[in-house]
Image (spheres, rainbow, N blue to C red):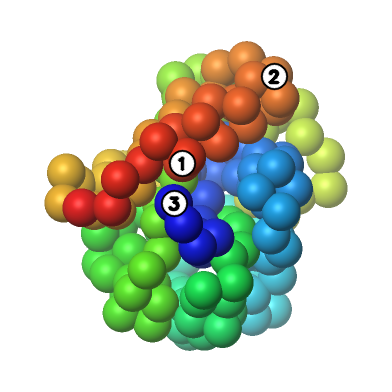
Amino acid sequence: MQQPPVVVVMGVAGTGKTTVGPLVAERLGVPYAEGDDFHPEANIAKMSAGVPLDDDDRWPWLDAIGQWARRRAGLGGVVSSSALKRAYRDRLRSAAPGVVFLHLTGDRSLIERRMSARTGHFMPTALLDSQFATLQPLGDDEAGVSVDVSGSPKEITDRAVAALRGFAPR
């Protein structure tokens, strides 16, 4: 990739977007933005109460992430966003056409163990089933790569950076 990409680190809750995203950004030499910071308070309150967000909740959040990604076009950046549905990724792509998706994937039991061990996060493990039910993996025609989240954050980051560097846009 000749110019720094804008990478959206996506996946269900607990895959390590907030851990791996900043590490990938550091390795690529670009800024990182935490997708959760773009949520309005109402979304955080809803998720904290164990209530899944619906599309009407997500559109303004996705639009804010898309605006950040558009401002980073040509400069590079990494931002986290679950981006579980193709429609959500389409929305991000329409705001920032050059974005590349890094889909962090993993076994449900591993992700649930990691979610159970973390502290201070508003997303309860009770919402993991709804996340997996909503997830539409990257299509063959979508700009992006998938990386398994087994292993240490460094191992995952190494795989992610290698996959992104080897990525040829479709």
Q: Are marks 2 and 3 in contact (CB under 8 Å)?
A: no
Q: Which residue is mark 3?
A: 1
Q: Which residue is mark 2?
A: 152
Mark 3 or mark 1, whichever is nearer to me: 3
Query: Crowding at label 2, few (<14), some or many (≥20) Cα neighbours within 10 Å?
Result: few
Can residue 134 be seen here?
A: no
Q: Give the spatial CA distance, label 3 vs label 1.
A: 8 Å
Residue kind at label 2, given as amino acid type: Ser
Q: Which mark is drawn over residue 114? A: none
Mark 2 or mark 3, whichever is nearer to me: 3
Residue 42: x percent and y percent?
63, 79
Residue farthest along the right direction in this orientation: 120
Q: Give the spatial CA distance, label 1 vs label 2.
A: 18 Å
The residue depicted at 55 percent of the width and 44 percent of the height is 13
Of mark 1 and mark 2, the one earlier in the sequence is 2
**Taking 144 as reference, is 39 left or right?**
right
**Taking 136 as reference, is 141 left or right?**
left
